[in-house]
Image: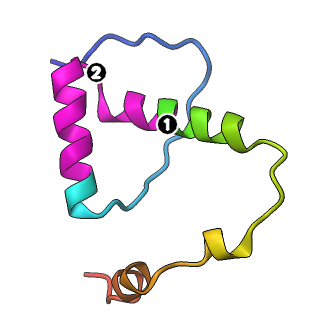
Amino acid sequence: MARPKIFTEPRKATAVRLPEPLHSELRRVADERDVSVNHLVIKAVREWLMKHEGDPIQLDFWRRDSTEQASSNAPVA
């Protein structure tokens, strides 16, 4: 059974691709805390945005590493 809704603002569905180990860890932590993976992702993104609001853009930070580039260039099944 799904958890009851606890939000009031409209939501926008989106998809992200996470490395398998990161997703597994995220699911484990969500299960331990009895919250959804979605809840943890929303919380993490909000905290990151608040922390970095007004920061100058650092191009090196936004560059993909070779692992991400290799996986993102893989053919779509």
**Residue 44 at what x, y percent from top left?**
49, 36
The residue that appears at 49% across and 49% down in the rendered structure is: 14
Distance CA(mark 1)–CA(mark 2): 13 Å
Q: Which residue is mark 2?
A: 35
In the image, the segment drawn in magenta is 23-42
Side of 23 where 13 appears, left or right: right
Q: Is residue 17 above or below residue 45?
A: below
> Element type at marker 1?
helix
| Foreground of the two, 68 or 1 | 68
Q: Which residue is mark 1?
A: 44
How far across and down, in percent of the image, does residue 33 sit?
23, 19
Position of 74 relative to 46 (above/below): below
Report crowding for label 2: few under 14, some 14 to 19, many 20 or more residues within 10 A (C-alpha). few
In front: mark 1 or mark 2?
A: 1
In the image, residue 37 lies in the stretch drawn in magenta: yes
Q: Which SS does the magenta portion mostly show?
A: helix
| Residue kind at label 2, given as amino acid type | Val
* Amino acid of disc 1: Ala
Give the quarter of the figure containing the N terminus: top left
